[in-house]
Image (cartoon, rainbow, N blue to C red):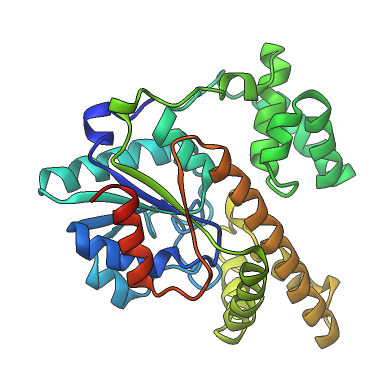
């Protein structure tokens, strides 16, 4: 599955690690481009997961049309192939309206799939998947991640140890085909005349980003992230494997299940979320840095959203 080159050339992309300021800059950029925003966030697709995914506010969504937000219920597992199909539909509709498709977000796998196409691999083998799931429950996510590292270190480097669904898929592909899934995902960039007008990513200073992540997690807790997680986990049916493993929600759910019930332990859980988020941002940095199509917009942390948006325009030669 691959985006048509004619459409891709009309698209703009603004990526960056979590908390880097891309959402605010994207609103300005959308106004300057007469664009509509397509979310590149793998968890913003889920209804009811608002605070922990830092979804744009309803006011921001009214200012600029947004797509690929609140399109699935948490119990649904959502594949990259499904994402690619729906974003293609959204981009085509935006283009038909005479506006610019502007992709914004931090999910590197989704970005790569749009830029270079998607390797879908063999059909699901549910017997193999169930066996790996049972072993993961018995031995833990770190053990499962190590099994992938043993056969496909490239894929293991890209995937967080808590991303059991994608880790099991990679192990399944290796077991079925005898080849690492990363071998089939090593598609190079398209020719220059088939690439988007601009693929920019915001690269803030590491120390600034770490401090900003910590502040944002604290703010999310103040806004009611714990209560949001409790409502989510009480749903019937409960969240599926993808949503329940989302960054922060997994840690808060473990606290709510009674494994960590004192206020002191809640503080410790918040610190775990901050650490996991900083590690996630580091992996995002690696994704964008390694995609040749991406142009880094180095920032100091002092720029306004307007300044960042105009630097993106300048980088594209607009």
Q: Measuring 28% from the left and 62% from the top, which residue is drawn there?
A: 29
Q: Which quarter of the picture shows residue 293?
A: top left
Q: Position of residue 265 (x, y in %)?
A: 84, 80
Q: Measuring 57% from the left and 38% from the top, which residue is drawn there?
A: 290
Residue 111 appears left or right of 261: left
Identify the residue at the far right of this view.
139
Residue 46 appears left or right of 71: right
Q: Which quarter of the picture shows residue 93?
A: top left
Question: Which image quarter is the N terminus in?
Answer: top left
Q: Nearer the viewer, residue 73 or 30?
A: 30
Q: Position of residue 53 (x, y in %)?
A: 52, 65
Query: In this picture, is 83 found above or below 52?
Result: above
Q: Measuring 23% from the left and 72% from the top, which residue is drawn there?
A: 63
Q: Position of residue 104 (x, y in %)?
A: 39, 55
Residue 153 appears left or right of 42: right
Q: Nearer the viewer, residue 179 or 8?
A: 8
Q: Which quarter of the picture shows residue 58?
A: bottom left
Q: Nearer the viewer, residue 109 or 197?
A: 197
Q: Measuring 44% from the left and 26% from the top, which residue is drawn there?
A: 189
Task: Please indicate, yes or no, whether residue 256 appears anywhere in the rendered image.
Answer: yes
Task: Please indicate, yes or no, whether residue 245 appears anywhere in the rendered image.
Answer: no
């Amino acid at each position: 599955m691959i985006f048509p080159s004619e459409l891709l050339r009309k698209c703009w992309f603004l990526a960056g690690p979590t908390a880097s300021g891309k959402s605010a800059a994207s609103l300005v950029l959308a106004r300057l481009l007469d664009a509509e925003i397509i979310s590149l966030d793998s968890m913003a697709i889920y209804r009811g997961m608002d605070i922990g995914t830092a979804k744009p506010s309803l006011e921001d969504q009214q200012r600029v049309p947004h797509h690929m937000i609140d399109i699935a219920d948490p119990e649904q597992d959502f594949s990259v192939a499904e994402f690619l199909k729906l974003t293609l539909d959204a981009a085509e509709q935006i283009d038909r309206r005479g506006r610019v498709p502007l992709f914004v977000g931090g999910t590197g796998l989704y970005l790569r799939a749009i830029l270079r196409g998607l390797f879908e691999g063999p059909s699901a083998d549910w017997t193999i998947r169930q066996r790996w799931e049972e072993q993961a429950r018995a031995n833990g996510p770190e053990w499962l991640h190590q099994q992938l590292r043993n056969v496909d270190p490239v894929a293991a480097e890209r995937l967080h140890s808590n991303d059991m669904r994608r880790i099991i898929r990679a192990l399944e592909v290796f077991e079925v085909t005898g080849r690492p899934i990363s071998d089939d995902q090593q598609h190079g960039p398209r020719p220059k005349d088939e690439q988007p007008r601009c693929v920019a990513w915001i690269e803030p200073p590491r120390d600034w980003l770490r401090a900003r992540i910590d502040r944002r997690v604290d703010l999310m807790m103040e806004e009611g992230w714990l209560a949001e997680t409790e409502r989510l986990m009480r749903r019937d049916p409960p969240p599926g494997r993808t949503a329940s493993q989302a960054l922060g929600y997994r840690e808060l759910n473990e606290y709510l299940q009674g494994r960590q019930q004192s206020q002191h332990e809640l503080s410790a859980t918040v610190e775990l979320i901050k650490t996991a988020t900083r590690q996630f941002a580091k992996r995002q940095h690696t994704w964008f840095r390694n995609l040749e199509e991406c142009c880094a917009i180095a920032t100091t942390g002092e720029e306004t959203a307007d300044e960042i948006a105009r630097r993106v325009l300048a980088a594209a030669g607009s």
